[in-house]
Image (cartoon, helix red, strand yellow):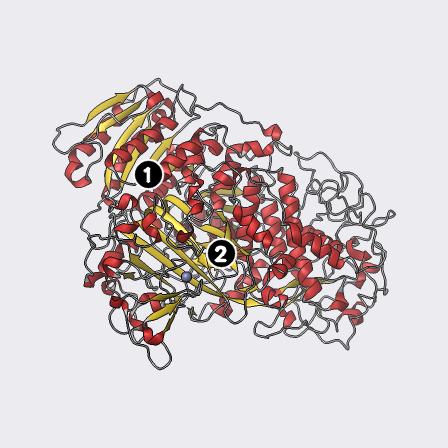
């Protein structure tokens, strides 16, 4: 395990880390080195020796429930101080704009609970980390497989330049592609071989195997079989139906592309174990240059140079005929076509999309299988329902999947196994996640003046996995095995099973998630914090004023300040507010309650920012209400005639930071900014946008900040607990990659409204602003993840700052932010004891209370790879892989990142294929049941704008998306990469439910229907050219298709059931997301349709992204190469 240890000795990031001293403070973390005090958060290591602090008495209010089981999810019975964190909850609405704050409410019914989040990554240190596939495994695996030979592969043939994608074999894509495999492989399909055991039902039906002789199949693994052994023939393809029905048995060995006529050899149209689908029309054209393609019509896309064989799919034609998507042009340069033989193009044939794993089917199956029962967390290593399933969680000792999701719930016992599989071990953690009303918020536990009970050595917090011994006088740590005395006040007798008799009375003994009240030892400088402050900082340069933005913001703030977050039992928010405006200079406002009018103070020396007033800058809203209202009325007037176009930016953050420092509190800056800060000042930027860098080695610079100035500023902000939220309104490039640095590293959020127009964008902006101001946020937060012996957290992804290798610091952490943590082995694990995680988040509440939120999770460990593959969660895996890749682009060429991603996934699947599937089916693509969507989702990541930008995507968009994704939770990455597509015209207007989603492909669209597509950032409403006039009338209030305006940003409010239904669907989707989605109306064959098609992710994209079918073939190829 020396590899891992070595890895751990270096910071996970490559940047210089001045504040690296923290690494010497092992007591803070899982390192059993007691007693080393920590500088800033010394108390977090436990009480200092000799500590004597006045501490809040052990008030009954904060005590854990004293009897019986935890109260039901009713706010009334929760400790009162804790309710503040129920944003949606329990009748105690502590904030929320009365009127249009819809986004703050959950949809009444039945939608999957998808808390949104929206943050932004931080890359700080990560910035320059080298990206690359994990080292060992690859080599290992390929060596391992070197012995396998598969007949006559042509893999080494030089790829024809520029054609198609794929490994260096040139073979016609779909059909001929994998013919090299082998021989014999096909023969096993005889009637005598039964279908694989449980499996197949969801296998890939492949009506036409993409590769003759190599049916794709998936295999369902029985989830409960210990010591799983692969099914006999382990194919997802229904064997029995194969040869017989096709009438064209494949030759035992079939090198080379299928011969004409062999296409018929595909699996029969209906296969018992698979989704049956009609035989695909024989229209699939080979990737070969110039093969005749039937069914192709449509011009070459303008953005592509003509390429042989390239065809746009199905322009304007919908229906059953699927346009060919032959070439993988451009996506994998240099790895042209499939097809191993020169010669005549193979007969047109294609893989039936209905036969390959369908995300929709998987989502639906999980909903119907797991949506009705509560998910009870009492059992170790349980895989939760998918994020798309609506389910209720009952905490019985492990954290809810709303707080933590893992890539696998069964971890390999050894590092070697983990490397062999290449399955990353990661947890996606959302410490302050919002819960639906029917679930219970974490209880707040007060252990009195000595603080939370913790292990003496590793400092883990009391949790359900600690073992009490010696009649209850001591406990053994489940993380490090150290034995600790139970403090006298915490002593309790054990029952005959060894369980404390107060087990069910104490959340920290019986629940997976809870909070501790922190003592002063857990506070900076050993001082209880003051309540935080919000500072609103408004750009009043020419563009901001002229667009109406300044007036809009001021008008909104007048009411919004009455809805600042507050603790549930408090009459008013404890948060103080302050106001700044700026262009090239800064204007501070004194809004002290005793003043008749606000006073402005201008600081024009922006080189050395200071705050010109202390008293009267940060005020209580109620006390200063009149003065504030007066100020917000006056600001738009004061700057109405401004001619100033230049802005500063860094000094604005510095001003906010200084104000918080002076007030000795944490807080949040809300900065509303419009342009590249070119005015002379610290942090001044230049326009360095250059799209010519795309696909060059310098592309990474587009994602990197252009100066390190902001990194240093971010560090200062984190030290003060100054979180920065940024609302951007650019009309041109403003360098999101640089402006966003402070936001990401302080745990803040970025919102971007390009070409902001009052009429169309104000609602979206205001909804975002309201939600952002009101949402739950913890300040001055530090998170540490402890693990039981054998694994260790080694890498972190999200919007935060790290000054050492273990502590994730966030000036602010809100309910939408997610931190993804990767684990590596540093020793062997055991199947008996499993593996434990404990995430501890120390933070200051909105009322200034210092708390610790604890989440515990127990996982299984395995010695059989099959157990690993049976307990994976692909959505979480994709979340991790996307974040890893998106960080990778900071340090490596994008192509390298993409290749590494493909390679890693191919290895994951090859390892499964080799170790868990039947050895007799070497030529088949066999996907583990839990990962059968890995290829389609991976392809979506690969063709996302960050990794493969379309021509219309700006550099700022890419930086923005990169940062957003980095703090997304699993539900958000799921819908972001594979958008939800709903046929609106098939919605039941009398029901509350959503219409069943369909797959993201143009061929699924009917020109007589209307569809909605959402990805968490946008909602498209697509209208087919043949939609009934009455539907158009009902939805848009116009009489014909041609009259529909695609300038609409909302749907007209019309009094008919269809209009109401569609609007309710839109509203329902909006509340599930952390950001207000932009509504875009797309008419079929309109120019905007190009944008819409970009989100039909199963299709080939104009930027060169592969179709799902093609990519699946490509993955198969990659896997086969690894196996051979
Ligand atoms: Zn311990």
The structure residue drawn at horizontal position 44% and vertical position 29%, both measured from the top left corner, is 709
How far apart in space, not on screen, are marks 1 and 2 (Cα)?
A: 28 Å
Q: Residue furthest front?
A: 50
Q: Secondary structure at mark 2?
A: strand
Q: Nearer the viewer, residue 564 or 442?
A: 442
Q: Name the residue carrying label 1.
A: 720
Q: Is residue 288 above or below residue 762?
A: below
Q: Position of residue 303 (x, y in %)?
A: 65, 34
Q: Position of residue 270 (x, y in %)?
A: 70, 68
Task: Report the side of 612 relative to 301 (left or right).
Answer: left
- Closest to the camera, between mark 1 and mark 2, is 1
Mark 1: give few (<14), some (14-19) or many (20+) Cα within 10 Å: many
Q: Is residue 152 above or below residue 1076?
A: below
Q: Nearer the viewer, residue 1011 or 888?
A: 888
Q: Nearer the viewer, residue 977 or 1067?
A: 977
Q: Name the residue carrying label 2.
A: 427
Q: Position of residue 128 (x, y in %)?
A: 55, 37
Q: Is residue 597 above or below residue 125?
A: above
Picture quadrant where residue 615 is located: top left
The structure residue drawn at horizontal position 70% and vertical position 47%, both measured from the top left corner, is 325
Mark 2: give few (<14), some (14-19) or many (20+) Cα within 10 Å: many
């Amino acid at each position: 395990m020396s590899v891992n240890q070595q890895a751990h000795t270096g910071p996970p990031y490559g940047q210089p880390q001045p504040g690296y001293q923290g690494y010497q403070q092992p007591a803070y973390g899982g390192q059993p080195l007691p007693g080393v005090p920590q500088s800033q958060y010394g108390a977090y290591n436990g009480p200092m020796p000799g500590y004597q602090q006045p501490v809040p008495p052990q008030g009954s209010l904060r005590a854990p429930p004293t009897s019986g089981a935890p109260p039901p999810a009713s706010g009334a019975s929760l400790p009162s101080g804790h309710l503040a964190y129920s944003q949606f909850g329990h009748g105690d609405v502590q904030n929320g704009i009365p009127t249009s704050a819809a986004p703050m409410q959950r949809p009444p019914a039945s939608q999957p609970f998808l808390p949104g989040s929206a943050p932004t990554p931080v890359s700080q240190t990560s910035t320059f980390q080298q990206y690359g596939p994990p080292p060992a495994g690859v080599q290992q695996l390929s060596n391992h497989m070197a012995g396998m030979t598969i007949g006559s592969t042509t893999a080494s043939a030089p790829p024809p330049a520029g054609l198609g994608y794929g490994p260096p074999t040139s073979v016609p894509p779909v059909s001929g592609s994998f013919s090299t495999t082998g021989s014999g492989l096909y023969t096993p399909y005889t009637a005598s071989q039964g279908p694989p055991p449980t499996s197949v039902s969801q296998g890939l039906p492949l009506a036409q195997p993409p590769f003759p002789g190599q049916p794709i199949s998936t295999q369902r693994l029985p989830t409960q079989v210990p010591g799983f052994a692969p099914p006999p023939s382990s194919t997802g393809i229904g064997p029995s139906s194969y040869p017989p029905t096709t009438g064209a048995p494949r030759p035992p060995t079939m090198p080379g592309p299928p011969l004409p006529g062999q296409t018929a050899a595909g699996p029969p149209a209906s296969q018992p174990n698979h989704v049956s689908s009609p035989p695909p029309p024989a229209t699939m054209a080979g990737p070969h240059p110039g093969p005749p393609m039937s069914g192709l019509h449509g011009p070459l896309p303008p953005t592509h140079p003509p390429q042989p064989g390239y065809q746009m799919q199905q322009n304007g034609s919908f229906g059953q005929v699927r346009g060919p998507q032959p070439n993988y042009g451009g996506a994998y340069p240099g790895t042209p076509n499939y097809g191993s033989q020169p010669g005549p193009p193979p007969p047109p044939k294609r893989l039936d999309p209905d036969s390959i794993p369908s995300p929709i089917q998987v989502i639906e199956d999980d909903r119907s299988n797991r949506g009705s029962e509560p998910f009870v967390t009492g059992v170790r290593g349980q895989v939760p329902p998918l994020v798309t399933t609506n389910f209720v969680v009952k905490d019985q000792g492990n954290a809810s999947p709303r707080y933590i999701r893992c890539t696998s719930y069964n971890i390999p016992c050894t590092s070697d196994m983990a490397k062999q599989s290449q399955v990353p071990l990661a947890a996606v953690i959302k410490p302050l996640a919002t819960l639906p009303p029917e679930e219970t918020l974490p209880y707040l536990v007060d252990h009195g003046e000595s603080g939370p009970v913790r292990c003496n050595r590793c400092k883990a917090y009391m949790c359900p996995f600690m073992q009490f011994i010696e009649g209850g006088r001591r406990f053994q740590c489940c993380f490090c095995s150290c034995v600790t005395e139970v403090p006298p006040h915490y002593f309790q007798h054990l029952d005959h099973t060894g369980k404390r008799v107060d087990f069910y009375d104490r959340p920290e003994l019986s629940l997976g998630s809870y909070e501790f009240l922190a003592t002063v030892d857990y506070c900076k400088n050993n001082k209880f914090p003051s309540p935080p402050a919000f500072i609103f900082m408004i750009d009043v340069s020419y563009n901001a004023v002229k667009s109406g933005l300044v007036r809009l913001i001021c008008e909104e703030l007048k009411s919004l300040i009455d809805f600042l977050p507050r603790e549930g039992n408090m009459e008013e928010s404890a948060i103080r507010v302050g106001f700044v405006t700026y262009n090239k200079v800064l204007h501070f406002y004194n809004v002290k309650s005793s003043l008749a009018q606000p006073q402005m103070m201008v600081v024009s020396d922006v080189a050395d920012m200071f705050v010109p007033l202390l008293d009267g800058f940060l005020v209580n809203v109620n006390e200063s209400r009149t003065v504030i209202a007066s100020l917000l009325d006056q600001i738009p007037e004061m700057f109405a005639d401004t001619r100033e176009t230049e802005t500063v930016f860094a000094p604005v953050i510095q001003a906010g930071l200084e104000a918080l420092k002076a007030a000795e509190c944490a807080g949040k800056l809300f900065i509303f900014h419009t342009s590249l800060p070119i005015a002379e000042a610290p942090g001044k930027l230049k326009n360095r946008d250059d799209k010519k860098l795309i696909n060059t080695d310098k592309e990474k610079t587009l994602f990197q900040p252009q100066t390190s100035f902001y990194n240093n500023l971010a560090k200062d902000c984190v030290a003060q607990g100054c979180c920065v939220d940024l609302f951007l309104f650019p009309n041109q490039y403003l360098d999101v990659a640089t402006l966003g640095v402070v936001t990401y590293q302080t745990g803040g959020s970025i919102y971007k409204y390009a070409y902001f127009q009052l009429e169309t964008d104000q609602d979206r902006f205001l909804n975002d602003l309201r939600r952002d101001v009101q949402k739950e946020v913890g300040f001055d937060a530090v998170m540490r993840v402890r693990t039981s012996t054998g694994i260790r957290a080694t890498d972190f992804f999200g919007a935060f700052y790290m000054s050492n290798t273990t502590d994730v610091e966030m000036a602010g952490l809100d309910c939408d932010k997610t931190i993804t943590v990767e684990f590596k082995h540093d020793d062997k694990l055991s199947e008996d004891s499993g593996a434990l995680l404990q995430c501890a988040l120390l933070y200051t509440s909105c009322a200034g209370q210092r708390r610790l939120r604890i989440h515990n999770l127990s996982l299984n460990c395995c010695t059989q790879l099959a157990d690993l593959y049976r307990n994976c969660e692909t959505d979480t895996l994709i979340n991790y892989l996307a974040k890893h890749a998106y960080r990778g682009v900071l340090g490596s060429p994008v192509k390298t990142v993409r290749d590494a991603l493909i390679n890693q996934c191919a290895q994951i699947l090859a390892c499964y294929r080799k170790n868990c599937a039947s050895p007799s089916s070497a030529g088949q693509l066999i996907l583990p049941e839990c990962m059968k969507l890995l290829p389609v989702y991976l392809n979506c990541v690969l063709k996302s704008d960050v990794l493969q930008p379309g021509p219309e995507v700006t550099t700022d968009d890419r930086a923005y998306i990169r940062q957003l994704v980095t703090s997304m939770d699993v539900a958000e990455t799921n819908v972001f990469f594979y958008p939800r597509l709903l046929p609106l015209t098939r919605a039941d207007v009398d029901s509350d439910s959503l219409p069943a989603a369909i797959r993201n492909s143009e061929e699924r669209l009917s020109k007589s229907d209307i569809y909605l597509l959402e990805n968490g950032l946008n909602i498209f409403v697509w209208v087919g050219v043949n939609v009934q006039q009455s539907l158009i009338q009902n939805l848009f209030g116009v009489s014909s298709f041609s009259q529909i305006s695609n300038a609409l940003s909302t749907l007209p409010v019309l009094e008919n059931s269809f209009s109401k239904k569609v609007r309710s669907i839109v509203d329902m989707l909006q509340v599930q997301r952390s950001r207000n989605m932009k509504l875009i109306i797309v008419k079929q064959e309109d120019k905007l349709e190009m944008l819409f098609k970009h989100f039909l992710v199963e299709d080939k994209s104009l930027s060169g992204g592969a179709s799902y079918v093609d990519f699946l073939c490509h993955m198969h190829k990659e896997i086969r190469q690894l196996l051979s």
